[in-house]
Amino acid sequence: MRKLVVTLFIIVLFIPDLNAQNKILDSLENLVQVQKDTQLAATYNELTWQYRTVNKEKAILYGNKAIELATKINYSKSIAQAYNDLGIIFYDKENYDSAIALYNKAIEIRKKLNDELGIAKLYNKIGIVYQKQGVFDKALENQFASLHLFEKFKNDFGTAYALNNIGILNQNLGRFNEAIEYHKRSLAIKEKIKDRIGVAGSFVNIANIYLITQDYKNAELTYLKAIETARELGDKEYLSNALNNIGNLYKITKQYDKAIASITESLDIRKSLEDSKGIVSCYGNLGDIYFEKKEYKTADTIFNKALLIGTKAVNCLPEINKVYLSYSKLYETIGDSAKALNFYKLYSTTKDSLYTDQVGSKFAELETKYKTLEQNEQIQKQQFQIAKRNYWIIVTSGLLILGGLIGYLFYRRKQLQQKNKLQAEVLHQQELATKAVLFAEENERKRIASDLHDGVGQTMSAAKMNLSALQNDLKNIDENQKLAFEKAIQLVDDSCKEVRSVSHNMMPNALLKSGLANAIREFIHQIDNRIIKIDLYTEGLNEKLDNNTETVLYRVIQESVNNVIKHSGANHLDISLLKDIDGLSVTIEDNGKGFDTTDKHKFEGIGLKNIQSRIHFLKGTVEWQSQVNKGTLVAIHIPI
């Protein structure tokens, strides 16, 4: 390997033109023709790495050649290197399961070589893959294993970046205090080894956590340190990120002039880097600031610039999606409801598209796995055909075994059919029971509402009339007695209103008369907008729905709104009801404190269980999407 490095160094010295990469590859290809054994295996390793950014499929081909040759000559170091490089290539291809499998194979060989520092680097890479997949517990486990080995060998650079990754993982898990401590430990080491780019990155990570936890003073001070470090280094990427982030901080704290200055400087840098995503993001942030300043024309102009650039660029969909939402709020504020609804639809559509793209990439990964399995199956079939020609006795035995297996499978199939029938009947009985409970519940609500309105309500009204009539007869009473009498009448009057309100909520007249949309609208109007501002969008609900569907959805939306008011701390709520040929879609989105949807205890309450059972009764689906401090979205779909 040492000879190879010297050879490559000489090659690089004599490449003066712009095709240096291609000439290196050509030179390495030529070396393959004259080398053998360990030198050839090392060249295959180098070709794997060099082709990584040029031609991934060719890189994989040379990686497999390196493994094949190195295994043949028992050159373990080359095998470990090939698995390592192939793991990186499959990570770049977003084939994460394959990347982890390759890294683990490299670890097995590194353990036999007693190469603990190499193992530490592999644990670090595996942790990054698990973090990318969102499997944070396994990511932490591997990062801590990496940290232990880096500290053992006093490798400051590796230690600093393992601590940095652990900090990021704790931030992902919402453990903000622990995250800051790990980032500070990482920062101290980076300052010690004079890794200035790493220092700037740590400052940004720490400041971001302060911003999330609303510690705005420390966030500002830390962002300023990141900006100062990035300016000293001349690193435009870090500088632009830090300026954009501190601009958002100033926007949150309503220091609009500072916010505009910081984001404008970030925008100029993004333009010099020709970074379309960064440019659209900066324009979107500037537009939001001018919107908050109520300079609506300026905000409109800036949002338009963002869309002009974003729609022409590649991979700007998340940034464009944010601008669509901002545009919708702008037009809603200035009273142009048609444009506001149009941009909200664009926002919803692109948000769905983003989700579809993520699912699509996952399907692409699964398709790759399927093709690999299919190729392996084809190889196995060919091997079976060879065995069939040479060993007919084994084939005969195999057919007998296969016959027995088919009989067993037939027996198992019958058992499964019986089990499925039983499960179907159980589900049918559960559905009937749920329907009966809901029917009984609504009938009881109607009865209580009727009793309250026609019984208690009429009695209270009669009491008020009698008291009012009696008031005319009581002329010779002093002022205190008169005030006490009037207060009694007022209490009776308030009780009448309360009884009417309770009976109406238990069975809303608007639902019985003019449908779901009007019932929801009337329910919202009863809520004080000083407590929470609620926006309602409806489409396609011109005709009444089935009574069961309307009643169940009214109760679900009523329960959801009450949950937002009681628990979320939100000051704004969007409710959308859209009916089309596919069914009825309902979204309820607030800007409250949110919650951890992976915490099963959150779904053990009666309220959420009632919502789930009601929606399942209608053969629909309900999902909760939420993150801590980022609000909650309830998405419901009912097939019509």
Image (tube, rainbow, N blue to C red):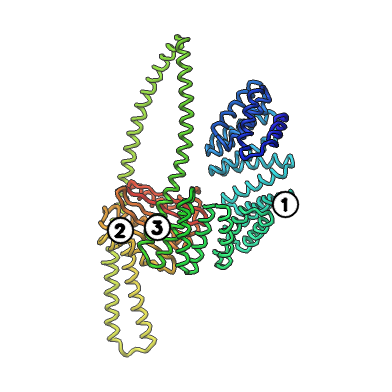
Disc 2 versus disc 3: nearer the observer? 3
Secondary structure beneath disc 2? helix
* Snapshot quadrant of residue 527: bottom left
Residue 554: x and y, percent? Answer: 33, 57
- Percent position (x, y) of residue 564? 44, 59
| Rendered image: mark on residue 379 | none
User: Residue at horizontal 64%, vertical 34%?
Assistant: 24
Looking at this rendering, what residue extends furthest in the front direction? 17
Residue at the spot x=53%, y=58% of the render?
Answer: 282
Give the answer, above or below, for where 417 lies relative to 619: above
Q: What is the quadrant of residue 141 in the picture?
A: top right
SS at circle 1:
helix
- Amino acid type at circle 1 is Glu
| Helix, strand or loop under label 3 | helix
Say few, some or many: other residues with alpha carbon within 10 Å of mark 1 (under 14 / 14 to 19 / 20 or more): some
Mark 3 = which residue? 344
* Residue 502 appears in the figure: yes
Nearer the observer, 356 or 45: 45
Q: Can I make out residue 567 in this image?
A: no
Q: Which residue is mark 2?
A: 516
**Which three-letter amino acid code belongs to the residue tagged 3?**
Tyr
- Mark 3 nearby-residue class (10 Å; few <14, some 14–19, many ≥20): many
The residues bearing labels 3 and 1 have C-alpha atoms spaced at a distance of 47 Å
The residue labelled by disc 1 is: 191
Q: Amino acid at mark 2?
A: Leu
Inter-mark Cα distance, 2 to 1: 62 Å
Q: Earlier in the sequence, mark 2 or mark 1?
A: 1
